[in-house]
Amino acid sequence: MSSSLIQTAHRIVVKVGSSLVTNDGKGLDAVALARWASEIAELMKQGKQVVLVSSGAVAEGVARLGWSQKPTAIHEKQAAAAVGQMGLCEAYEKAFRQHGLNTAQVLLTHEDLSDRTRYLNARSTLLTLLNLGVIPIINENDTVVTAEIKFGDNDTLGALVTNLIEGDALIILTDQIGLFTADPRKDPAATLVRDATAGDPQLEIMAGGAGSSVGTGGMYTKIIAAKRAARSGAATIIACGREANVLTRLAAGEAIGTQLVANTTPLHAKKQWIADHLQLAGKVVLDTGAIRAVKQAGSSLLPIGVTAVEGDFLRGEVVSCVDGEGCEIARGLINYSAAETRRILRLPTGQIEAVLGYIDEPELIHRDNMVVIAN
Ligand SMILES: Nc1ncnc2c1ncn2[C@@H]1O[C@H](COP(=O)(O)OP(=O)(O)O)[C@@H](O)[C@H]1O
Ligand SMILES: N[C@@H](CCC(=O)OP(=O)(O)O)C(=O)O
């Protein structure tokens, strides 16, 4: 495995977790922020472009408001995030200013990335900032999101941003030196995984599943983030943000932490956008013939292969294609609404016009607008 992943990377997304940013919830760690800023400034001198995805708004808000613990009520978390985000912005602005660098605050919601126009706008703003030599500091827009539309964790956000800007690498800085064969807090015999392939199912087992992890997402969301980032061909490094010069050493070619390489062929940008949808508008259930056609022959989905429809989607929305057990086979942009699909399912394409009185496209989902999910 090459240790030069970051050495050769031009566009890098660095994600820092709440525990690091806020000194385990005690309040913003100005020393750590200054260290990352100085290292990022060094990478920029080397001609690299860097986006920072920073958590910590809720934890910092809780500290500033003098609350003894993180609230459970969503509106209180949102209020805390609004308070804490001010602190994050101020601290990053100050830290990067020391190096003559401008920062930009970018707050995103899942809806911003699932709407095609907003997605393209976010992309062009971020690329413009990078070309201007500004460091975008990204967080989830916690104040306006509800449970349904939350990214849920910034590891996922980091991966989606990596896909959005076609980053070469995602560096996830956390409180462990990397991914261990089991949670090192619970299993002292666990050993560090140095190299692996992003998307290897074994990694998800090591991370113990979302339920058993510590913090917002634990290691599990980092492993899933690596799998997502690999869709656009990006490698992921999981390393400790407390380690001295972690970013500059990685850029110098040193192998630190866990390196997860992408061995998948990068998806075309539009297909990546389809694959990145966290909330889908509905489902269509496929029969065995359609599953074979979509999975093995790479064919478009025709109405004849659909046995049932779930949800209330519109033409042009992203829906999930599932088998009889509910297991996802593919997802794609559907050409007919849920109501229309219910009327034409199981029918040969030649009958669409007779039933609906019109025909938009002969396919329910065209192969160019469909991504097969690797299980
Ligand atoms: N296999 C594993 N290897 C390393 N850490 C793990 C593993 N499984 C679970 N963890 C836990 O994940 C934690 C890091 O996740 P989290 O607290 O969400 O960090 P962050 O705030 O940086 O996102 C670690 O402190 C560790 O206890
Ligand atoms: N948007 C939230 C981030 C929550 C989150 O993902 O935290 P972490 O698991 O520490 O990266 C905040 O700033 O508090």
Image: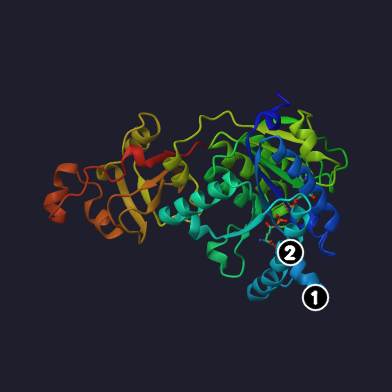
When the figure is inspected, residue 251 is found, relative to residue 354, above or below; the finding is above
Dot 1 or dot 2, earlier in sequence:
1
Q: Which mark is residue 90?
A: 2
Disc 2: residue Cβ within 8 A of ligand 2's nearest atom: no
User: Which callout, 1 or 2, points to the residue nearer the camera?
Assistant: 2
Amino acid type assigned to the residue bearing label 1 in the image? Trp
Q: Residue at x 54, y 44 (%)?
A: 165
Label 2 element class = helix
**Closer to the camera, 361 or 128?**
128
Q: Quadrant of ligand 2?
A: bottom right
Q: Residue at x 66, y 36 (%)?
A: 47
Q: Residue at x 29, y 42 (%)?
A: 305
**Residue under pointer 1:** 67
The picture places residue 161, in percent across and down from the top left corner, at 57, 48
Residue at the farthest top position: 1
Report which quarter residue 223 is drawn in.
top right
Asked if residue 96 can be seen in this view, the reply is: yes
The picture places residue 345, in percent across and down from the top left corner, at 25, 50
Label 1 element class = loop
Q: Which mark is residue 287?
A: none
Report which quarter residue 154 is drawn in.
bottom right
The picture places residue 310, in percent across and down from the top left corner, at 37, 57
The N terminus lies in quadrant: top right
When the figure is inspected, residue 342 is found, relative to residue 297, above or below; the finding is below
